[in-house]
Amino acid sequence: MGPAAALRDWDAGLPKVWMIRRVLRFRAEQPQHFTGDSNYQPITASGARLSNIFAFRRGKDLIAVMPSFGVTVKEDWQDTVLPLPDGRWINLLGAINVAESATPDQLFAEFPVALLVRANAVSERH
């Protein structure tokens, strides 16, 4: 099941279950990203809506991104951009690949949360 199918049953909580299942499967397959040494580092967006996006990096190779509470993914994000560390990043909750920076429209195009993993740090299964 992909993100579009999960979003069809919003009221039943399917998107949340789909996301948790996907992240837990990734964690089981790639435990090196979830060690005690993987500290959290905030990432600050730039632009008019920078306070409406919450992002943090876990270790070197994972970034979680979500809109702030009360903000919909269909907001007018204007010039808001999230800077990314060096490398190419794959969204495990969507189909996009990004480098250098990403807009909320890119990150939330398919699902209202993004989990980015550095491309060279993920196995061929993802």
Image (spheres, rainbow, N blue to C red):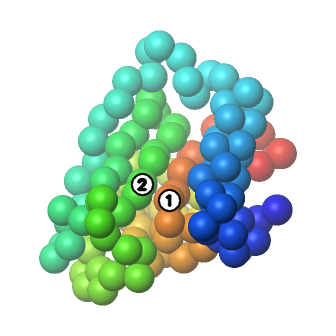
Question: From the viewer's perspective, is residue 80 above or below residue 14?
Answer: below
Q: Position of residue 87 (x, y in %)?
A: 50, 51
Q: Earlier in the sequence, mark 1 or mark 2?
A: 2
Question: From the viewer's perspective, is residue 50 above or below residue 60?
Answer: below
Relative to 93, is 100 on the left or the right? left
Q: What residue is drawn where x is 34% and y is 50%?
A: 55
Relative to 18, is 74 on the left or the right? left
Does the rendering let one see residue 61?
A: yes
Label 2 secondary element = strand
Question: From the viewer's perspective, is residue 83 above or below residue 31?
Answer: below
Looking at this view, is 12 or 36 the one in front? Answer: 12
Q: What residue is drawn where x is 30% and y is 59%?
A: 69
Q: Residue furthest front?
A: 12
Question: Amino acid under label 2?
Answer: Val
Question: From the viewer's perspective, is residue 6 above or below residue 18?
Answer: below
Looking at this view, is 96 or 27 the one in front? Answer: 27
Q: Position of residue 30 (x, y in %)?
A: 70, 29
Q: CA distance from mark 1 to mark 2?
A: 6 Å
- Neighbor class of circle 1 (other Cα within 10 Å; few <14, some 14-19, many 20+) is many
Does the rendering let one see residue 96?
A: no
Looking at this view, is 32 or 11 the one in front? Answer: 11
Relative to 17, is 50 on the left or the right? left
Q: What residue is drawn where x is 25% and y is 81%?
A: 79
Q: Are marks 1 and 2 in contact (CB under 8 Å)?
A: yes
Picture quarter with the N terminus: bottom right
Q: Which residue is mark 2?
A: 65
Q: What residue is drawn where x is 60% and y is 67%?
A: 11
Label 1 secondary element = loop
- Neighbor class of circle 2 (other Cα within 10 Å; few <14, some 14-19, many 20+) is many
Q: Which residue is mark 1?
A: 113
Question: Amino acid under label 1?
Answer: Val
